[in-house]
Amino acid sequence: MAGVFANTLRPAIMAAARRQGLRRAAERLPVTRRVVHRFVPGETIESVLNSVAALQESGRFVSVDYLGEDVSDADGADAAVQTYRELIERLGQSGDPAADGVRPLEVSVKLSALGQSLERDGEKIARENCWSICDAAQHAGVWVTVDAENHTTTDSTLSIVRDLRADFPWLGTVLQAYLRRTLGDCAEFAAAGARIRLCKGAYDEPASVAYPKQTEVTDSYLACLRVLMAGSGYPMAATHDPAIIDAIPALAHESGRRAGDFEYQMLYGIRDGEQRRLAAAGNHMRVYVPFGTQWYGYFMRRLAERPANLAFFLRALAERTH
Ligand code: FDA
């Protein structure tokens, strides 16, 4: 089943994720919205702040993502920046920085939502927009982490992050263990003392740039995490994989790190019990909480990760038609 899923269903779901017509149709369907609610708690800042408060109450940190990617004009990018600035201001009113310097509140941003893919001056526009978000975050005591998108954007994204870290050394970014280049990127950013969120990677990538087998991705993840733990930065292990989570305490210990010197991260709605267990055991546990109306791309990547999610989605659609 796993092979059929990886070879047939997964590419089909990822192809569907790229179809604008499907996206528009799905986002209009209330039934889809109800299903999506498992992964996306709300559409407005108000609703996501309620989820943030509940997560904080259970001892978890958060990273809030305003959904949207691949904006097609500068106005769309400006609108995303305004939403982020408002979100950051509201988040800043709701919490103090933790004593050990780790900020419990964070926002995650996709540079493609800030204009990176615009034909004219895309990289420059995204850099300026991200600077504006970081500036607001600096004042509010909120962290920012830049998400990783498909491999054609990696060089541009990392170059923007390097530039912005001169003004905002706490700025974090995501590295994807499925990319063959990532061990080298980890070495660079670990030596620079950066905050790095390591994930497996969620896009459909060719074997020329990414490891095709899950076992290779897991091996790469562990090798990358060992480098991050040994470096002078702050590693953020973003995964739900029990095999990796079980290996983390030993990797941290090897590098002399205590529980507060790194963090676990998971997505909203996935392995909630495990999130609570890790937080209750005294670890930093951060939950990535997406919100907004443009949930389609994010949701389709969650479907592509797990056959059971696809069944869950199709079941809900079938119930609707009966
Ligand atoms: P894996 O997919 O092997 O899953 C292990 C187990 O976790 C499964 O057996 C299941 O129990 C559970 N699980 C995993 N996914 C599930 C799902 N969708 N629904 C239900 N259960 C699920 N990617 C990227 O390319 N760029 C990015 O910026 C980010 N950012 C990011 C932030 C955070 C905080 C997390 C946790 C993840 C990301 N990702 C990401 C996504 C990441 O690349 C990856 O696709 C998912 O985390 C799934 O991979 P796992 O490591 O969880 O392992």
Image: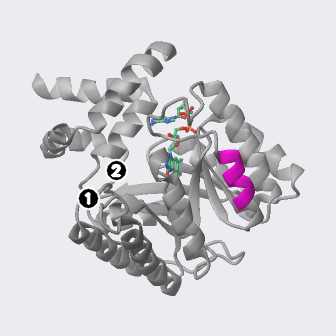
Q: How many marks?
A: 2
Query: Is 207 on the left or on the right of 23, as rendered?
Result: right
> Could you tell me how far apart the alpha carbons at marks 1 and 2 are, in whole angstroms?
8 Å
Name the residue tied to disc 1: 43
Towards the viewer: 224 or 122:
122
Q: Determine the image quadrant of residue 72.
A: bottom left
The residues colored magenta run 182-188
Residue 243 appears anywhere in the view: no
Q: Cβ–Cβ below 8 Å for labels 1 and 2? A: yes
In this rendering, the answer to whether 10 lies above or below 209 is above
Coloration of the structure image: one colour
Percent across and percent down for residue 110 are 41, 59
Magenta span contains residue 219: no
Percent across and percent down for residue 304 are 40, 31
Q: Tell me the SS state at disc 2.
A: loop
In the image, what residue occupies the spot 48% across and 55% down? Answer: 288
Name the residue tied to disc 2: 40
In this rendering, the answer to whether 139 lies above or below 72 is below
- Label 2 is placed on what type of residue? Val
Towards the viewer: 197 or 208:
208
In this rendering, the answer to whether 7 lies above or below 92 is above
Query: Is 78 on the left or on the right of 258, as rendered?
Result: left
Towards the viewer: 255 or 29:
255
In the image, what residue occupies the spot 37% across and 45% down? Answer: 39
- Label 1 is placed on what type of residue? Glu
In this rendering, the answer to whether 170 lies above or below 317 is below
Locate the C terminus and report the quarter of the image it occupies.
top left
Percent across and percent down for residue 156 are 49, 60
Per the picture, the main secondary structure of the magenta-coloured stretch is helix
Percent across and percent down for residue 310 are 34, 27
Towards the viewer: 218 or 34:
218
Magenta span contains residue 185: yes
